[in-house]
Amino acid sequence: MSAASNYLENELLDHVLGENTKNFTPPSNLYLGLWTADNGLEGGTLTGEVANANGYARQNINVDSSSGAFDNAASASTSNTQTITFPAASGGNWGTITHIAIMDAAAHGTGNVLFHGAVTTSKTIEDGDTFQVSAGNLTITLD
């Protein structure tokens, strides 16, 4: 995952350059969402997120606040420090997961896309299946 959304790029520029910093409050929690297509994630479009049904919910990735969700960045890159596991699909399928996004809101259909990218290998989630990102496998790189 190496793409920052347009929203985040603008907020980072404003923050670093001291412009409009009062308008941005860092989120206290970040959430990982699953997408079945890249339908404008760059621009923050939420179309294509797994339907808010069958047990799907964005997962809080700040679970262990003592160590943080990501390791200390080095060489403009950081990776998750803990495994992120979605609950099993229940009552139906979620479809084929092709993209993921880090969001600043828990509720489906709300918030801002911060980072997004394609998964290395698409995974079809059928009733009873789970989706998991092992520690160290979610890498964010700024270039």
Image: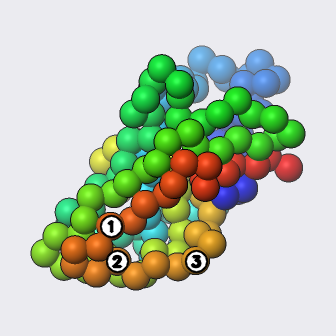
Identify the residue at image location x=70%, y=41%: 78
Where does the image place residue 91, in percent across and percent down from the top left?
13, 75
Where does label 2 land, which residue?
125
Q: Is residue 71 above or below residue 19?
A: below
Where does the image place residue 48, in percent across and percent down from the top left?
43, 72
Element under label 3? strand
Where does label 1 land, which residue?
130
Task: Report the Cα–Cα distance between label 1 and label 3.
Answer: 15 Å
Q: Is residue 20 above or below residue 57?
A: above
Task: Report the Cα–Cα distance between label 1 and label 2.
Answer: 7 Å
The reply to whether discs 1 and 2 touch (Cβ–Cβ < 8 Å) is yes
Identify the residue at image location x=60%, y=17%: 22
What colour scheme was applied to this rendering of the protein? rainbow
Amino acid identity at mark 2:
Ile
Amino acid identity at mark 1:
Thr
Where does the image place residue 5, in percent across and percent down from the top left?
65, 52
Quadrant housing residue 61: top left
For residue 121, the mark is: 3
Mark 1 crowdedness (10 Å alpha carbons): few <14, some 14-19, many ≥20:
some
Amino acid identity at mark 3:
Thr
Looking at this view, name the residue that lies furthest to the left: 91
Quadrant placement of the N terminus: bottom right
Which mark sits nearer the N-terminus, 1 or 2? Answer: 2
Inspect this view and state whether residue 98 appears. yes
Element under label 1? loop
Q: Is residue 40 above or below residue 79?
A: below
